[in-house]
Image (tube, helix red, strand yellow):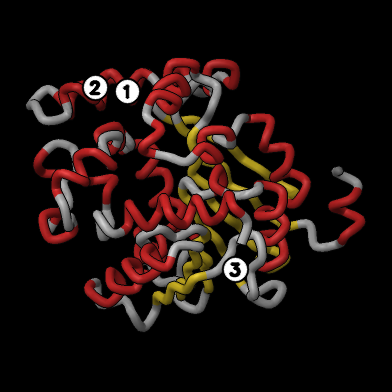
Amino acid sequence: MEDRKLKEVEHSRTRRTILQGFERHSDTVADEKTANLDELISDQKAFDFHFSNVKYYSIIQASENYEHSWFKSKCRKGLRILDFGCGNGENGLYAAQCGAETEGIDISPEGVANANLNASQAGLADHCHFKVMDGENMTFPDSTFDLAVEYGALHHVDLDKAMSELCRVLKPDGEMICVEALRHNPLIHWYRTRTMHLRTQWEVEHILSVKDLDIVRKYFQEVEVKFFHLAVLAAVPLRKTPLFKPLRALLNGIDAVILTNKWIGKYAWQMIFIARKPRKRNDDVEKNL
């Protein structure tokens, strides 16, 4: 295994042995916290150190609602969805709850073990399976999946190789949703470089830019992008106060207006892009190189 992948595995091992999952709801207003959080954290002191950035996920309501709406509209009984870079499996579990048959992959054995445990505890083990696999070299046959979901995994891999594989394993009318951080905002990226205990060097250097969507377009005929979370980041310090929810709603409203402008949008924290119609013929890909 390449050195960069070994470092990713080790980094993931540290995180996945501390927290079983659902970190996006671990440091927020009380009624939005994961109900059994204490049972999911093996070491509170280690969690406070290695997950000190999860407070920012308290404001992701808008992007999470958008993502969940996609699941509800697309997932149904009989469809197969790939949870790419599944981590602890939260997105695959949600897809299974919406009716799809989920298969998740991750390079991290600890993440896969957590994901399968979470599926079992949620009563979804019959419809949700996770396995250790390299996302740049998947062993699934061509055109296996109807759908795919990816959350924060593409900046951990070689994007070109990963998109090529995703194009291959999706059916000709397949579709995938990707949630990724953006690199354009200098303050946000400065924070990343100042908190290297939270991430690998490869990760920091490969946070996606809007230009990277050109790589996605090499492999998919349609790519639709939407930007999230800029003004609303100001609500994070108030996440455990009564002011948080109304302030978050107000700032989400501002973001909904200003982030429709692509020049402003690229300075947001996250983007969600939906890729449709994988280019199955080699010459279609080559024409876009």
Q: In which quarter of the image is the C terminus?
A: top right
Which mark, by number, is residue 168? none
Q: Are marks 3 and 2 in contact (CB under 8 Å)?
A: no
Whichever of labels 3 and 2 marks the residue nearer the N terminus, that label is: 3
Q: Where is residue 256 in the image (x, y as percent from the top left)?
A: 42, 25
Q: Mark 2 points at which residue?
A: 235
Q: Is mark 2 on a helix, strand or loop?
A: helix
The residue drawn where x is 47% and y is 41% is 200
Indicate the amino acid at tag 3.
Asp
Q: Please tell me how crowded label 1 is: few (under 14), some (14-19), or many (20+) other residues with Cα within 10 Å.
A: many
Tags 1 and 3 touching, CB below 8 Å: no
Seen in the image, is 165 located left or right of residue 49? right
Give, as a three-letter code, the residue at label 2. Answer: Ala
- Quarter of the image with the N terminus is bottom right
Report which residue position mark 3 lands on.
146
Q: Could you tell whether 107 is left or right of 146 in the image?
A: left
Observer-nearest of 49 and 102: 49
Residue 197 image offset from top left, x and y in percent: 36, 36
Q: Where is residue 68 in the image (x, y as percent from the top left)?
A: 38, 51
| Label placed on residue 232 | 1
Q: What residue type is labelled 1?
A: Val
Distance between the alpha carbons at the discs numbered 1 and 3: 34 Å
